[in-house]
Amino acid sequence: MLDQVKTDIDSLMAEIGRNARAAARPLAIATADQKNRALEAMAAEILAHREAILAANAIDLANAKESGVAASFIDRLTLTAERIEGIAGAIRDIAALKDPVGDVIAEWDRPNGLHIERVRTPLGVIGVIYESRPNVTADAGALCLKAGNAVILRGGSDSVNSSQAIHSCLVAGLKATGLPEHAIQYVPVTDRAAVGAMLSGLGGAIDVIVPRGGKSLVARVQSEARVPVFAHLEGLCHVYVDKSADLDMAKKIAVNAKMRRTGICGSMETLLIDRAVADTHLAPLVEGLVAAGCEVRATEEIRGRIPGLVAATEADWSTEYLDAILSVSLVDGISGAIEHINRWSSAHTEAVIAEDPAVVERFFTEIDSAILLHNASTQFADGGEFGMGGEIGIATGKMHARGPVGVEQLTSFKYRVRGTGQVRP
């Protein structure tokens, strides 16, 4: 029986791969107007079917609550009328972006008269594997379409009803505007064998995999994938408060970076404070976080100054809490902050709060995370906030795409060389 199930899944996934590859060619040559009309139609379908999406989401939420998952997980899974408006708005924002396909990135002339252009092209077929966030279904589908790619979406079992309801709206938008309905496919089974099939590349159908989820998912993808991967590691994000920082600004940023939404990858997980201002800055910062409902885990040095805090262990420095929990340490200035971050960071997002330009310059130069911020919350680690009209995720690797993966990052390039009869001697 198990062999039959695996055979059925393999057959299903192979068909999905063939359909995606067939859809990729017409998508690659679709005009900007065709793609934009499809995106606008998708947004309209989502708004028209918001009640059906909310009903599907209610099923997912009931199942999740019954299984006893964390509150941060519930937050990521939850859809509201406002969030559905945001999903439709994000699709329309993507439609408003410049079409990257065909964009001339660079051009130059050679002494022999050849004119060379480097031009953006679609990647082809993208596999997106993600967990819990149903909005990723819309974001990933819309971004891949805008960049001229077919996409195969495999969401988590926890959000399957919500994701399928959203996916049906995307397909309706494709059909209404004459683009291939298989341009955006959703894997309709929750069996993990489907993930394994995608990681194998589906017989050459998939060109790149984008994982968006927890450490175990990303580790599996990086271990098993037989196609290129846009790595998206966990968000072990740090905020360093320098002795030159404005205290009121630091308090506002620290609370926002941790507590605005604790379950997103851009949420601060570790706060580092310059030991030189421990007497003036430490207590106000910690008290502000505690007052906002955050559990603070601190070093013994800090607990000696502020009683009642939870003791931090070494494991805390490498933990992505995705919850209202934060680890705090004192460090010896910018050098100590750089040392701590370079040791423990997942290379996602870090922020420095400082007025000293020399400190900021060292922070930007000596830390190699994908996103670095000065005097701003780590919660800005988001493609929409970067003006990209949404993102599939934050890539923490160093090849091809890094940081928010938007429409430009979902393209490759080719060279066009124009001559007037030249031959090589």
Image (cartoon, rainbow, N blue to C red):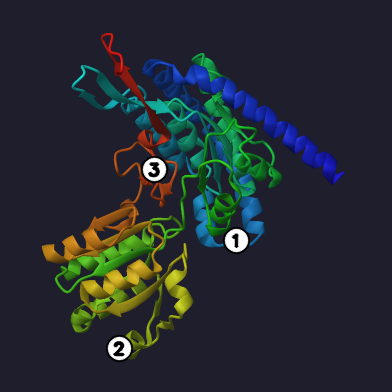
Mark 2 / mark 3, whichever is N-terminal: 2
Residue plotted at (19% across, 68% down): 248
Mark 3 / mark 1, whichever is N-terminal: 1
Q: In which quarter of the image is the N terminus?
A: top right
Q: What residue is disc 2 on?
A: 305
Instruction: Name the residue type under label 1.
Output: Val
Residue 115 vs 120, above or below: the answer is above
Residue 401, disc = 3
Residue farthest right in this picture: 1
Q: What residue is disc 1 on?
A: 69
Residue plotted at (43% across, 55% down): 264
Residue 390 vs 168, above or below: the answer is below
Instruction: Name the residue type under label 2.
Output: Arg
Which one is closest to the eye, mark 2 or mark 3? 3
Q: What element carries label 3?
A: loop
Q: How far apart are marks 3 and 1 (CA)?
A: 32 Å
Mark 3 closeness class: few <14, some 14–19, many ≥20 residues within 10 Å? many
Locate residue 239, reporting x and y percent.
30, 66
Report if residue 191 is visible in the image: no
Q: Do the residues labelled 1 and 2 touch (CB within 8 Å)?
A: no
Residue farthest front in this picture: 425
Locate residue 317, reporting x and y percent.
42, 73
Q: Quadrant of the C terminus?
A: top left
Report if residue 310 is visible in the image: yes
**275 or 197: which is nearer to us?**
197
Mark 2 closeness class: few <14, some 14–19, many ≥20 residues within 10 Å? few
Q: Is mark 1 on a helix, strand or loop?
A: loop
